[in-house]
Amino acid sequence: MAALDATRHRTLTRLLDDLVPGDDLSPGAGAAGGAEYVEGLLSAFEHDPPRIWAGGPFSGRHGGEPRFGEFLEPSGWEAHAWRTRIHGWSQQYSEGLAALGPDYGDLGEPERAARRAAASEDFLDLAFTHAVESLYGDPVYGGNRGGAGWAAIGFPGDSQPAGYTDAEVSDPWGERQGGAQGGAQGGAQGDAHGARQASSASSPGMGR
């Protein structure tokens, strides 16, 4: 189930938004490219090398040669393990999206909630894990469109080779330098960061 047709793409996007919804700080996981993330993961071995692990050492966002898009070649056993894992996930997504129904993306929240309540718990756990990964992972994998998930938690992305200043490390929210206004803004960002960390911590695990 590597490629999603338009109906399943809409269903998956709506589901990911339901599992990790948007707010004033961030779009939901689906709106930020979550379905594209899942598609990219399930079709990883349609590329050479497989799109499992992004390259490096730099993304180019803060200098250096942009090489995150040059994916690394897995070893034989690594490739076997990932093929097995992805095969199982593909089956779960195929069955899970079919169970939600082709009209899921067009329903109101009460009807969608009833469909989710009847869905496989294992499937919903998998979709939630991938929703979190997509929203807070590197955009090279297809999610976190425009770095929206990072912006919501005040994370600028990978910093190399520029690195961070001592002040940025010791006072990441700008509370000491910004006075009352900076402190209020930093506190709000910190509260959002803590809430999203708690959401991420409930995930069964972060894949790549």
Image (tube, grey):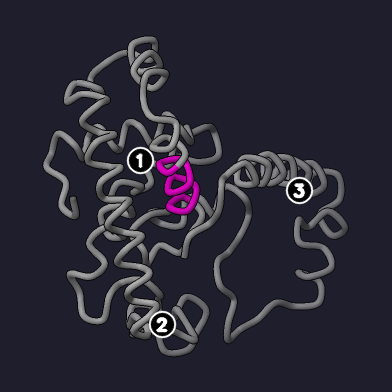
Quarter holding residue 47: bottom left
State the image coordinates of residue 176 (x, y, percent, origin top left).
88, 58
**Which mark identifies residue 55?**
2
Going by the numbered disc 1, the residue's amino acid type is Ala
Does 130 appear above or below 53?
above
State the image coordinates of residue 147 (x, y, percent, origin top left).
46, 57
Question: According to the image, label 3 marks what residue?
Answer: 186
Tell which circle, 3 or 1, labels the residue nearer the N-terminal end: 1
Going by the numbered disc 3, the residue's amino acid type is Gly
Report crowding for label 1: few under 14, some 14 to 19, many 20 or more residues within 10 A (C-alpha): many
Report crowding for label 3: few under 14, some 14 to 19, many 20 or more residues within 10 A (C-alpha): many
Cα separation between marks 3 and 1: 26 Å
Residue stretch in magenta: 126-135
Circle 2 sits in a helix, a strand or a loop, which is it? loop
Tell which circle, 3 or 2, labels the residue nearer the N-terminal end: 2
Q: Main secondary structure of the magenta part?
A: helix
Cα separation between marks 3 and 2: 33 Å
